[in-house]
């Protein structure tokens, strides 16, 4: 084997190693985005993204054909799958971050209003949104909740007489059918200031 062939062989090995590392990195990001999709768009689409991730086997197999055209097609397919999964989820994660900031600010506003006036605000007419374009993604309501307690055997029971002032926030990232929910009293969860989520 000549020195030129040795250099070409080493270069090819380095290129394939870099490509493999890049591919593994893309897969890791796609998997993280699929898990993120459970929170941003719900369990059905998250499962679909998981299916798309599994399709990465196809370009991986194609890549090992000796043809340069096949390798280019394989890389193109891998990049296409990544483009279908990653950018949208990163944008939705950013929206979720902004909604979390807005919700945190809204909770602070409602609690400060209760400290000043003795009641949570009835609506958000006096509230100034940090991100007005996200207003359609947030619903607020003031209401009275039944006071709940946990029995000795772990059941959560609502008191029939005692009610407490409460407020709730519902926010969604992409679709209204996958809301993230909050109540100041914790509702039936008995976890004060806790969020819960309905994935679809």
Image (cartoon, rainbow, N blue to C red):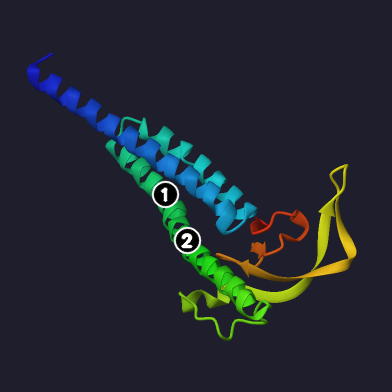
The residue at the far left in this view is 3
Q: Which of the two labelled residues, at mark 2 and mark 1, occupies the earlier sequence position?
A: 1
Measured along the vertical axis of the image, is residue 66 above or below residue 130? Answer: above
Q: Position of residue 16 (x, y in %)?
A: 28, 31
Q: In which image quadrant can residue 45 be found?
A: bottom right
Q: Residue at x 47, y 65 (%)?
A: 98
Label placed on residue 82:
1
Q: In this rendering, would 122 be left or right of 75?
A: right
Q: Residue at x 9, y 16 (%)?
A: 2
Q: In this rendering, would 73 be left or right of 172?
A: left
Question: How many angstroms separate mark 2 from mark 1 (CA)?
Answer: 22 Å
Measured along the vertical axis of the image, is residue 93 above or below residue 69? Answer: below
Is residue 138 among what the camera can see?
no
The residue at the far top in this view is 1
The residue at the far bottom in this view is 125
Q: Position of residue 58 (x, y in %)?
A: 46, 38
Residue on which the image places disc 2:
97
Provide the secondary structure element on which disc 1 rests: helix
Q: Position of residue 116 (x, y in %)?
A: 61, 78
Nearer to the camera, 143 or 47: 143
Is residue 37 among what the camera can see?
yes
Measured along the vertical axis of the image, is residue 45 above or below residue 100? Answer: above
Q: Residue at x 46, y 45 (%)?
A: 30
Provide the secondary structure element on which disc 2 rests: helix
């Amino acid at each position: 084997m000549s020195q030129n062939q040795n250099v070409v062989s080493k270069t090819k090995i380095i290129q394939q190693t870099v490509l493999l590392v890049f591919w593994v990195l893309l897969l890791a990001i796609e998997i993280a985005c699929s898990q993120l999709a459970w929170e941003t768009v719900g369990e059905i689409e998250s499962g679909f993204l998981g299916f798309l991730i599994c399709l990465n086997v196809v370009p991986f197999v194609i890549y090992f054909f000796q043809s340069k055209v096949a390798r280019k097609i394989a890389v193109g397919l891998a990049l296409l799958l990544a483009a279908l999964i990653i950018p949208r989820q990163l944008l939705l994660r950013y929206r979720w971050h902004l909604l979390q900031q807005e919700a945190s600010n809204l909770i602070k506003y409602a609690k400060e209003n209760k400290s000043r006036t003795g009641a949570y605000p009835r609506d958000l007419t006096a509230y100034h949104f940090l991100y007005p374009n996200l207003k359609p993604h947030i619903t607020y309501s003031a209401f009275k909740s039944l006071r709940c307690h946990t029995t000795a055997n772990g059941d959560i029971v609502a008191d029939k007489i005692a009610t407490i002032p409460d407020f709730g926030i519902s926010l969604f990232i992409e679709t209204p059918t996958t809301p993230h929910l909050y109540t100041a009293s914790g509702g039936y969860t008995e976890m004060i200031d806790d969020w819960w989520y309905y994935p679809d």
